[in-house]
Amino acid sequence: MSDLVQFAAEIRAGRAVLGWSQTELARRTAVTQRAIHCIEQNVVRPRKQTEERIIEAFAKAGLQFEPLSNGGFKMTVPVKVIVKRHPAGRAK
């Protein structure tokens, strides 16, 4: 898997877990929604600063991404993110 394809997959996965639209991620990173869309579709290579802003936005939200030796990635999602997103699933 190329770095660009993997980064695009990480963005889509991170947005899905957090319930963020492309517009919300764009707002949090000070880039356009169109730029997020193009990065996710592998139409453009993100600038280094844009890539760093996206990674930082997910880190601030509590997500961590790690590359795997097989070419995939692992996303770590803290329990607080899951509970915040799905409060009905809280343990009693």
Image: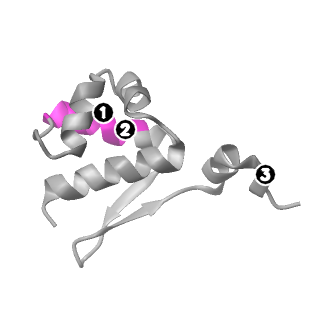
Which residue is found at the position 48% from the left and 38% from the top?
60
Q: Residue 85 in the image: state x and y as whole percent.
A: 64, 45
Which residue is found at the position 34% from the left and 63% from the top?
66
Taking the magenta stretch, the answer to whether it contains residue 64 is no
Q: Main secondary structure of the magenta part?
A: helix
Taking the magenta stretch, the answer to whether it contains residue 51 is yes
**Label at residue 56:** 2
Q: Residue 44 in the image: state x and y as whole percent.
A: 10, 38
Q: Which residues are magenta?
A: 47-57
Residue 30: image quadrant is top left
Which residue is found at the position 39% from the left and 32% from the top?
25
| Residue identifier under label 3 | 88
Does dot 1 land on a helix, a strand or a loop?
helix
Check the picture and name the quadrant holding the N terminus.
bottom left
| Residue identifier under label 1 | 53
**Badge 3 local density, few (<14 within 10 Å), some, or many (20+)?**
few
**Badge 2 local density, few (<14 within 10 Å), some, or many (20+)?**
some
